[in-house]
Every structure is written in structure tokens, then in C-alpha cells.
């Protein structure tokens, strides 16, 4: 036994010594960008769940027909030109002939056809079909009513000519193919050969600026420049260290120099702004995501539009987003985020306490008297809790109403909300993320009574008309006008109160140049990064 | 002895199936499923497709039987709903070894620290060493590791710059130090307490007095006679902690960015990834049972009076 | 520390069973006094007891002592450092940390102490039945406890919080309606207490069952049986009074575990409903801001650790006082 203990002590000593001898921080070599992120949730396969978090990986590995500049301008990428038919439903793309997959195979129109068919095939079980369902027969094929994939509105007229037919005219279409990774192609030959495992490091074939060299799950992924890439090849290798919760744990690694980029913790933004060094490395990217509060417009007391409007005008966006949330959100008046047609900041954002009290009095609740305790339901994530507690106090002060907070675990919240389609409630948290950066996603795809994703149960004929016209219109100026009218109606009738646009605060080392966050503010692009020392 | 082991293994099988059943029922009883409409557009058809793919559209009893059969017959724990490109077997295979290595290291560390502190505290009963040692032990038990881990990171990595802030590069990398320390703290503390109290009991025994009377060196008395006899309860405690530590800690693994199995366990609950939830729980129950069996068998080695028939 | 107490005693039961407290039928009054004196001689235990009493007093007097309302927000003082208007600084919503600590103490102590009621309500009957009847009853019950012990308690706690929440809050009418009412008034306290209690009874059941098993063989139980006392009477009149010492010790040592579990649940976002604070939620929020403003996490962590320390000291002291051989 004595020997056992002695051996044990020895082993510990050796292990401790070994640990200290191996150098702590890896030497930052030339042209390596070290970046912390999450292990992708779903596969990093554009045909299987184009969520924004995985979009991150996909956008650096794959490229679609077009791309969007940070100013929102769309330029052709995988195609050299496109023609729109007279009925504005059919788009014909002439593909570039010099684009190859990383194994040297050419990217053809057949790859696109294969991708969209695969993405919508019920057997693929793609959770996020996104706007692909707007392809002709997309919904029927995805729903299993239509079996023949060739009926889908996508055809290869020849190897380099792709024809896409939509259900109806779509002002959003070009933006979607440029930004939404669901429209990116996958390599037909590799997917057929390796099946579900085609995205693993040893199988993957990509057409974007990077390809995967190695991927130890939940530990590290190494992206290397794609040797076949047709534009300027990237100069960096990207070392993605994968952690469970990068948004709250990457700051220490950033400070010790283990990574070159970090999520700035939202609760420390004030302190970061005052930090002598880090304040210079702190950057913000606006994301195409809007946060708001949802009412059940059929349940008293919120069945009275005056009450909803009173809550609307007394929500102090400035104080909420800049004060409590330390600038992690930008104050919002419209659902449509900045940079998209129809966005407006001309609606009231604060200071309506007098008006709010007057409206409440008109509705029969002078100084909050007789107003029942209402319940605000929200998921229990850290920021959402801050928002809930801030709103609780804000409305208490302005209108003297009592808000009770009901925190639910995230999945429980989602199923709770799904059940509110038929059941009554008072008000709940709302947030919506646009994939392609087009207003259709916030109005036609969410608020419209046709889909009613938030279960507000609100319907307004004039509103439906404006957003219907906005979706079909191809002229950007006119679209902006239609959607602004729709926003005016929302501000008057208040089924939801938009209050903030999500901002992504991050830290980046000064020796990293050319880092971009993409149009929707979510997807970081590594293509142009250079390390300058 | 062999018969005893066989009986234990049989009992283990029963325990595992019961655990599987209980967790299955619990998983399906909590509200919310793995695929729900979130804050992005998901169509009704897409939801139906993915539920059908994972047979979530079937009656729950049939899902239970099919899945259980796959586990029993092929050891196949099924696909992960959330890490869709990997199976649960892949996930356990990738991440359990990490937790295991880290856990064993922490356990070595805590034995190496905890037992000597306990022995010293007992032999210097009521001295400042004793009080200091026990104070350390109680701190170790009282500070939750979701406070300890960030504390160590801020202190050792950010302020002092001695160590990297976390991550995983195998046992010989400095990255292992912070998570290992954080994991080792509670077992070290518990071992110190138990060693001390059993040593106190043993030191008063006749045979120790006899050994002393024989004029044996104090060190030998303590190590050869007292410690040896104090080992059984200490081993029990060590075994309990060993099982817990090698199956990973959600808090330590998340905060120190260790790709272990512990965090999969908690995240699978919040994402309703039923197969991962079941797989990790089974693994945990299995490890606990195996460690207990080993500890029980070790009793017989340490204490010749114990026999298993 | 969840499971260590569950297993240890089992190993030691055979050596025990004749401890002072367990020899006679009812504990003698003189013995109680001796025990109390022994407790008072133990400085650590006395310190623990005093700390516990002070904490309880502080929590009860929170409305009198708190310098600010615990929910009052000061957006211009977000995460302000200690000193000046806020002696312990403010949290992420600009609320006074000291006031929240005081009110949070109410929640944490309430969860710690009240969850013991649930633990005993389940654990004692199981222990009595298993220990008294022995045989297959014991086998089945203890097998069950073993199986449940093989499932990590955090899983239990998470599942129970979600389940109980649905049950209690869904019960607008029905037999549980009154629970739902209390729960709504108490910001979800009932849910947490129930979940923590439902998770924690296993260890207690195992421990007490061991003691009962030993007592069952004692002469006074045999005597009671021979004069025709039924099992319920024996359990209530003869067995239960003789395990009170053990129960007091177990409960004292189980309180810090409940407090800890509440904190862990809060850390995962499953704790109390805001704006009511608990030390666990304060830690969970504070950890996010640990890098530059550690005061928001340090204060509740120290108080939490001190509380657990105090209960552990007290529990150890009680154990030593009742039966020195019980220690371990």
C-alpha cells in the first residue's frame, strides 16, 4: 500500500511537471487566424438546416449564385448573368464555367438542381427549408403531396444554364440567393458517395474560399484555403476552437492571446468601453434581427388597442437598449432592421408617458387603477431576463401597472408559445431573425395573419395589402414605401412593440485586417483576412 | 468471488434498463420537444418531415420499445437530434475519453492532496495544522464549482497569465491545469475530512498503541498500521467521487471549454435531444456501478476479513 | 456533495447499532443535556450555530435592514463598484447588491430549510417501511433507491422543476390549486422547493433505513411486539423517536445541499421567478460580469459559501455530540 501511495504521488508530480513544461500559449505563427466558435448544431450542409449559426461555417465553405456587399448591393457570383421572364417568375442564370469544387470537379447547374431537390426532399428532413419552399411546387414537394422532384421549379437547361421558377413574383429573391445559405449548392458527387457523413473533414468537398483540413468535434476545426478557389485565394488558415458557450467564455482566451477574436460579453460592454486597450478593439455589427414584445390582441386588457398603444409609447427604447443592455441592442421603432427597404426610425421610441397615461385613462384605467396583473412570459436566457425585469419596472413607473414575469426554459417556452395559437395569454417575449435581410421575413413571413408566427391573433386588411404588394414588387424604392406604410399601421394598432435590433459586439486584435461580418451581421467571413504584424 | 461478480453484473443490467425507462419517461414528460418553432421561420411541413425522420410521430410506447431494442441488441444508442451528423455512440466515443482522462487526473490530484492533509490533521489533532486543513476542506465543499472555475480562470489566466484559460490538448498540456484543479477541489476536501475522522478513530485503537509501545517509528505506525485500516471508508468516498469526476462536470467543462461528456448531458436536456440524454445517463449509471463494484472488490484486497461468496 | 452520505453509513452499520442514542427506548432527559453540553464545547459547531442564527435573523429582518428596495433599478449605476450609495455595489440592472443579498437569503434559506420537509415526508416513510419490514419490502425499496441514485441528481432536479412547474401552475382548479396560488404569490418558490426536495430524499432514506434496521433487533422493539403492538404503533412510538437524533443531523447536513442545488438550478436559469433574488440567481448573473466587475458575484458567493460552511460545522458538531462514533 505504501508503494501504491508513493507511486501515486510520483505520477501526480510527473503530470504536474509535464503540464507546466509544455508552453501555455501557442506561438502565433504567420497568417493564422484563431477564432472561437461553437460546434455546429446541425450538419454544416446547406441542404440540411441553414441556421445562422451554421451559416457561419457554410458561408466560408460554399458560395452561391450571387453575393451581397455590406451596402446591400447584389452582384452575381456563381453566375455571370441572369434573365428575368416577363411574368417575373422565372430566372435564368448563366453559370460561370471556371468555378470548381475543391477536388477539381466543375460546379454545374446539375449541382444546384440536386441541392434544391435534396433540400426539399421530405426524406432529407431539412429543418430549415427557408425561402426554398417558394420554388414552384416547393411546398407540395416538401410536404410529400408531390413525389416527382422534376416538377420542382429548378432545372438545368444545360451544364451551365440554370432555370429557377418561383410560385410568384418575388422582390426578395436576389437578396435571398446572395445571403441565405439555403440557396448555396452542395457537391452532388460527394453527397451521393458519402451520404450523411459528407461534411466530415475527410469527405468534404467545397466551392467556397475555404475547405476543411481537420475537424475534431467540439475541439478544433482547421480551415485552409481551397486550392481550386477561383477568386483571390485567402491567405490565412483559420483555427476554429470550439467551445460550448463562446459568447461568455471567449474573453479570457482573447486576453491571454489564445484567440484573435472574441465575443464581447454583453454584461461587460460598459467596462470594455472604458478599458485602455480593449476599448480600441471593440467593434459592433448590426444584425438583421429585431426584438419586440407580443400581445394577445384577443385577450383583455390587451384587446383594447389604446392599452397596447399606451404600452408602446411608454417603452423607453433608449433606456432599455443603451442603459440596461449596455448597447448590445440598437433602439428600434420598426420591425424592419436598418439597411433594408422599409426600415424607419421616424416612429416614437420614448417619452410618451403623458400620452400613455391619457390612453390608459381613456381605456378605463386611470393611473393604472383597475388594471389586472398581467403576465409576461419569456425564455430564461440572461439578456431576456434583463429585458423582462427592465420592462416590468418601466411600465410600473410609467403606467402603474403590475407585470408578472414568467420565466420558461427555452424549449418549454417554444412549446408554450406554440400552444398559444389557440389559448389566451397576455404578452410575451418576441425576437425574429432574418436570414436573407429582406423585409418579407419580418412581415409576410412572421407578422402577417396568414402565418402569425407569434400568435398575436391580429388581423388588419390594409396592412395585409401593403405587405402583399411589398413582397411582389421588384422596384426597391416602391417596396420601401409599401413596407413603411405597413409599419405605420403596426405602430398604431400595436400587435407587437419593436424595441431593439440585435447588435453583435466583438473584440478583434489589431493585427487582424480584412475581417467582415457579412450583410446580416451574423456570418463572419474570413476570405479577406490578413495578419499584419 | 466470480459468482459474486456475475450476480453484480446481472443486477447492473437490471439497473440500466430501469434507468433507461425512467429517463425515457421523464424526457417525454417534460414540456417541449427537440423540434419546435423558434425565432426563425420553420414551416409546418419541415417540422413534420424531421419528426418523421426520427420516428417522433410514432406512439411513445413504440418509440420506447424500438429504441430500447436497438440499445440492447446492437448497443446502438441512435442518432443525435441536434448534432445531426453524429450518432450518440460517436459522441460518447469522442467525448467520454476526455472526461475520463481529466477525471482520473483530478482524482489523483485530490488523493495526493486530500489524504495527506487528512493524516496530518489527525496526527496533529487540534493543532493549527488540523484547523487549517479542515478549513480548507470545508471551503472545498462549500464553494460551488461554477464559482471556482471562473475564479481560477480570472486569477491564474487573466491576471497572473500563468496558464491558458482552458481548452483541451491532452493531459500533457498546460490547458489541463485549471479544469483539473476545479474538479479536484471538492473530492480533495471530502477525502481530507474522511481520512481525518477515520484516522482519529483508528489511532485510538489498541493495535496502534501496541505498535507504538513496540517502539516503532511514528511514521511507520501511521502509514503501516493506522492508514491501512483507515483506508476502507476513504476508498468508499474516493470511489463515489471518482464516478462523479470521470463522468464530467457540466459547469467546469462549459466554463473551461473542455470537450467532455458532462456538458452534453446538460445541453441534451435543454435541447430535448432524447437519445443523447439517454446515452449520457446510461453511461453515467454504468460508470457509477462499475466503480462501485471495483471499490467493493478492493475492500477484499485491503481487508482480509472481507470475503465475497 | 450529493451522494456521499448515502453510501457510507451502509458500510458502517454492522459496527454500529449499539450507539448511546440507540440503546434505550426513549432518549433519556439527562442524555439530552449532556449532548447539548458536548455541542457547546465544540467551538466550530457553536460558530456554525451562531452564523446560522445570524443569517436567519438577517433574512427575516431584510425589509428593515435593506437600504434600497430589492427590485429598484438604477440604469445609470449598472454594475457600479462597491462604495458610496451602494455599499456592496450594484448588479447588471443597477440594483443594490446588499439589499438583494438580504432578500436572497430569505429565498435560499427557505429553499434549504423547507425542502427538508419534502425530503422527510418521502424519505422517512420509505426508510421506516424498508427498515421495519425488511425482507422483500426492503429489497424492492432499496433497489429502487439504488437505481434512482444512479441517475445524476441534476437531471432529476431539472426534470422535476419543469414537471412540477407544469403541474402546479396548470392547476388553476383541482386539488393542487392552492399550491398554484401560493406559488404565484411566492414567485415560483413552491416549484423550487418541491423539485429540490424530490431530488434530495434518497440519501436520507438510505441513512435512516440503516438505523431502523439496527433498532429493529433491539429488545424493546421485540418487547413491544410481544405485547401485541402493531407495526404502525411500533414505528411511530418506538422507532421514530429513536432516530430523531440521526434525523436532526441528517437534516442539518442536507440543508447546504439543498441550497447548493437551488444555486445550481438558478445557474442553469431554472430558479426563482424575478425580480425576487436568490443567491444562486445572483451568482449566475454575476458570473457573466466576473471579468471587470467581480463584486456582483463575489458577494453572493461568499455568503453562500459561509452559509454552507456554517450548516456543515453545525451538522458535524451535532453528530459528534449525539454519537461520536457516528462521525465520518
Image: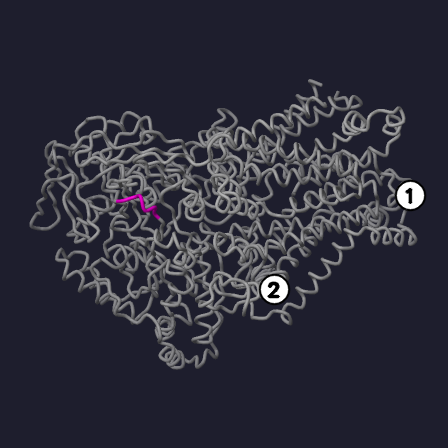
Front-most of A240 and A173?
A: A240
Quadrant into which the C terminus of chain A falls: top left
User: Is the residue B35 above or below the residue B296 in the image?
Assistant: below
Quadrant into which the N terminus of chain A falls: top right
How far from the left and from the top, in percent, is residue A503?
33, 56
User: Is the residue A446 above or below the residue B87 in the image?
Assistant: below
Residue B66 shows in this picture = no
At 10% from the left and 35% from the top, the residue drawn is: A157
Label 1: how many Cα within 10 Å (few below 14, some 14–19, many 20+): some
The residue indicated by pointer 2 is C103
Q: Quadrant of residue A201?
A: top left
Q: Which residues are magenta?
A: A508-513
Badge 1 or badge 2: first in the primary sequence: 2
Q: Which mark is residue C220?
A: 1
At 44% from the left and 42% from the top, the residue drawn is: A244
Q: Secondary structure at mark 2?
A: helix
Residue A252 is covered by the magenta coloring? no
At 22% from the left and 39% from the top, the residue drawn is: A63
Distance of label 1 from label 2 (alpha carbons): 48 Å
Amino acid at each position: 500500500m505504501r508503494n501504491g501511495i508513493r507511486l501515486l504521488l510520483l505520477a501526480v508530480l510527473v503530470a504536474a511537471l509535464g503540464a507546466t513544461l509544455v508552453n501555455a500559449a501557442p506561438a502565433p505563427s504567420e497568417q493564422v487566424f484563431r477564432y472561437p466558435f461553437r460546434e455546429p448544431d446541425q450538419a454544416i450542409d446547406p441542404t440540411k438546416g441553414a441556421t445562422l449559426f451554421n451559416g457561419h461555417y457554410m458561408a466560408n465553405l460554399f458560395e452561391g449564385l450571387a453575393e451581397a456587399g455590406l451596402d446591400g448591393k447584389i452582384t452575381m457570383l456563381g453566375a455571370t448573368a441572369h434573365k428575368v421572364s416577363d411574368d417575373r417568375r422565372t430566372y435564368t442564370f448563366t453559370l460561370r464555367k471556371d468555378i470548381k469544387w475543391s477536388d477539381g470537379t466543375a460546379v454545374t447547374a446539375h449541382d444546384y438542381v440536386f441541392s434544391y431537390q435534396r433540400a426539399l426532399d421530405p426524406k432529407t428532413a431539412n429543418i430549415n427549408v427557408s425561402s426554398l419552399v417558394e420554388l414552384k411546387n416547393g411546398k407540395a414537394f416538401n410536404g410529400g403531396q408531390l413525389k416527382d422532384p422534376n416538377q420542382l421549379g429548378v432545372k438545368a437547361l444545360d451544364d451551365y444554364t440554370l432555370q429557377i421558377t418561383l410560385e410568384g413574383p418575388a422582390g426578395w429573391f436576389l437578396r435571398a440567393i446572395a445571403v441565405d445559405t439555403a440557396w448555396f449548392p452542395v457537391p452532388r458527387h460527394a453527397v451521393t458517395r458519402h451520404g450523411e457523413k459528407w461534411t466530415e473533414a475527410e469527405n468534404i468537398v467545397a466551392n467556397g474560399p475555404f475547405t476543411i483540413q481537420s475537424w475534431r468535434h467540439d475541439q478544433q476545426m482547421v480551415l485552409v484555403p481551397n486550392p481550386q478557389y477561383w477568386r483571390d485565394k485567402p491567405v490565412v488558415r483559420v483555427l476554429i476552437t470550439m467551445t460550448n458557450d463562446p459568447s461568455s467564455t471567449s474573453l479570457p482566451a482573447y486576453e491571454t492571446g489564445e484567440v484573435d477574436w472574441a465575443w464581447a460579453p454583453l454584461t461587460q460592454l460598459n467596462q470594455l468601453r472604458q478599458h485602455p486597450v480593449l476599448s480600441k478593439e471593440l467593434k459592433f455589427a448590426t444584425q438583421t434581427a429585431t426584438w419586440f414584445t407580443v400581445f394577445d390582441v384577443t385577450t383583455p386588457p390587451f384587446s383594447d388597442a389604446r392599452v397596447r398603444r399606451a404600452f408602446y409609447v411608454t417603452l423607453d427604447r433608449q433606456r432599455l437598449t443603451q442603459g440596461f443592455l449596455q448597447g448590445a441592442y440598437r433602439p428600434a421603432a420598426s420591425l424592419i432592421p436598418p439597411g433594408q427597404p422599409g426600415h424607419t426610425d421616424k416612429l416614437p421610441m420614448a417619452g410618451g408617458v403623458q400620452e400613455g397615461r391619457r390612453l390608459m385613462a381613456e381605456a378605463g384605467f386611470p393611473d393604472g387603477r383597475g388594471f389586472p396583473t398581467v403576465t409576461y412570459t419569456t425564455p430564461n436566457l440572461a439578456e431576456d431576463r434583463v429585458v423582462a425585469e427592465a420592462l416590468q419596472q418601466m411600465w410600473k413607473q410609467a403606467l402603474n401597472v403590475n407585470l408578472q414575469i414568467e420565466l420558461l426554459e427555452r424549449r418549454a417556452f417554444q412549446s408554450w408559445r406554440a400552444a398559444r395559437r389557440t389559448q389566451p395569454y397576455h404578452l410575451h417575449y418576441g425576437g425574429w431573425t432574418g436570414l436573407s435581410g429582406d423585409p418579407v421575413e419580418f412581415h409576410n413571413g412572421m407578422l402577417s395573419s396568414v402565418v402569425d408566427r407569434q400568435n398575436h391573433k391580429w388581423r388588419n386588411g390594409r396592412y395585409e395589402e401593403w405587405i402583399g404588394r411589398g413582397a411582389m414588387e421588384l422596384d426597391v424604392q416602391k417596396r420601401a414605401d409599401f413596407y413603411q406604410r405597413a409599419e405605420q399601421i403596426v405602430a398604431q394598432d400595436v400587435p407587437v412593440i419593436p424595441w431593439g435590433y440585435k447588435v453583435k459586439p466583438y473584440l478583434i486584435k489589431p493585427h487582424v485586417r480584412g475581417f467582415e461580418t457579412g450583410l446580416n451581421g451574423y456570418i463572419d467571413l474570413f476570405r479577406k483576412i490578413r495578419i499584419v504584424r | 468471488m466470480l459468482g459474486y461478480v456475475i450476480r453484480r453484473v446481472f443486477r447492473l443490467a437490471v439497473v440500466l434498463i430501469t434507468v433507461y425507462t425512467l429517463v425515457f419517461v421523464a424526457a417525454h414528460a417534460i414540456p417541449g420537444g427537440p423540434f419546435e418553432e423558434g425565432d426563425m421561420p420553420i414551416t409546418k411541413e419541415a417540422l413534420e418531415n424531421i419528426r418523421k425522420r426520427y420516428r417522433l410521430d410514432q406512439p411513445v410506447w413504440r418509440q420506447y420499445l424500438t429504441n430500447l431494442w436497438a440499445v440492447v441488441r446492437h448497443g446502438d444508442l441512435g442518432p443525435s437530434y441536434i448534432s445531426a451528423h453524429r450518432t450518440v455512440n460517436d459522441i460518447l466515443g469522442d467525448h467520454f475519453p476526455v472526461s475520463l482522462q481529466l477525471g482520473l487526473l483530478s482524482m489523483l490530484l485530490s488523493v495526493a492532496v486530500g489524504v495527506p492533509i487528512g493524516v496530518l490533521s489527525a496526527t496533529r489533532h487540534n493543532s493549527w495544522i488540523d484547523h487549517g486543513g479542515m478549513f480548507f476542506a470545508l471551503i472545498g465543499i462549500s464553494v460551488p464549482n461554477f464559482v471556482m472555475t471562473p475564479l481560477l480562470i480570472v486569477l491564474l489566466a487573466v491576471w497572473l497569465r500563468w496558464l491558458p484559460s482552458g481548452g483541451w490538448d491532452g493531459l500533457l498540456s498546460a490547458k489541463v491545469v485549471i479544469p483539473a484543479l476545479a474538479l479536484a477541489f471538492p473530492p480533495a476536501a471530502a477525502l481530507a475530512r474522511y481520512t481525518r475522522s477515520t484516522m482519529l478513530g483508528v489511532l485510538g485503537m489498541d493495535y496502534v498503541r501496541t505498535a507504538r509501545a513496540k517502539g516503532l517509528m511514528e511514521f511507520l505506525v501511521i502509514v503501516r498500521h493506522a492508514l491501512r485500516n483507515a483506508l476502507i471508508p476513504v476508498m468508499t468516498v474516493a470511489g463515489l467521487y471518482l464516478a462523479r469526476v470521470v463522468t464530467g462536470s457540466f459547469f467546469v467543462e462549459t466554463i473551461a471549454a473542455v470537450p467532455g461528456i458532462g456538458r452534453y448531458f446538460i445541453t441534451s436536456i435543454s435541447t430535448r435531444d432524447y437519445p443523447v440524454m439517454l446515452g449520457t445517463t446510461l453511461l453515467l449509471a454504468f460508470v457509477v456501478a462499475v466503480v462501485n463494484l471495483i471499490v467493493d472488490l478492493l475492500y477484499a484486497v485491503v481487508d482480509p476479513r472481507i470475503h465475497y461468496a | 456533495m450529493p451522494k456521499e452520505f448515502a453510501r457510507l453509513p451502509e458500510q458502517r452499520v454492522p459496527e454500529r447499532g449499539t450507539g448511546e442514542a440507540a440503546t434505550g427506548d426513549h432518549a433519556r432527559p439527562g442524555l439530552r443535556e449532556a449532548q447539548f453540553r458536548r455541542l457547546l464545547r465544540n467551538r466550530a459547531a457553536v460558530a456554525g450555530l451562531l452564523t446560522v442564527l445570524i443569517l436567519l435573523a438577517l433574512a427575516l429582518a431584510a425589509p428593515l435592514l435593506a437600504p434600497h428596495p430589492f427590485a429598484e433599478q438604477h440604469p445609470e449605476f449598472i454594475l457600479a463598484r462597491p462604495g458610496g450609495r451602494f455599499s456592496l455595489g450594484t448588479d447588471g440592472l443597477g440594483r443594490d447588491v446588499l439589499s438583494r443579498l438580504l432578500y436572497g437569503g430569505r429565498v435560499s434559506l427557505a429553499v434549504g430549510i423547507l425542502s427538508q420537509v419534502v425530503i422527510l415526508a418521502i424519505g422517512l416513510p420509505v426508510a421506516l417501511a424498508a427498515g421495519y419490514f425488511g425482507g422483500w419490502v426492503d429489497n424492492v425499496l432499496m433497489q429502487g433507491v439504488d437505481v434512482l441514485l444512479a441517475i445524476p441528481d441534476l437531471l432529476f432536479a431539472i426534470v422535476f422543476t419543469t414537471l412540477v412547474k407544469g403541474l402546479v401552475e396548470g392547476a388553476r382548479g383541482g386539488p393542487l390549486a392552492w399550491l398554484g396560488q401560493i406559488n404565484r404569490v411566492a414567485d415560483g418558490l413552491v416549484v423550487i422547493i418541491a423539485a429540490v426536495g424530490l431530488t434530495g430524499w434518497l440519501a436520507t432514506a438510505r441513512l435512516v433505513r440503516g438505523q431502523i434496521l439496527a433498532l429493529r433487533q433491539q429488545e424493546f422493539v421485540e418487547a413491544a411486539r410481544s405485547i401485541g403492538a402493531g407495526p404502525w404503533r411500533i414505528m411511530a412510538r418506538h422507532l421514530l423517536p429513536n432516530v430523531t437524533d440521526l434525523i436532526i443531523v441528517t437534516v442539518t447536513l442536507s440543508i447546504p445541499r439543498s441550497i447548493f442545488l437551488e444555486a445550481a438550478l438558478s445557474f442553469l436559469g431554472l430558479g426563482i421567478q424575478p425580480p425576487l433574488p436568490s443567491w444562486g440567481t445572483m451568482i449566475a448573473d454575476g458570473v457573466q460580469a466576473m471579468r471587470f466587475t467581480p463584486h456582483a458575484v463575489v458577494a453572493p458567493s461568499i455568503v453562500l459559501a459561509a452559509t454552507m460552511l456554517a450548516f456543515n460545522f453545525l451538522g458535524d458538531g451535532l453528530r459528534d455530540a449525539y454519537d461520536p462514533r457516528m462521525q465520518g
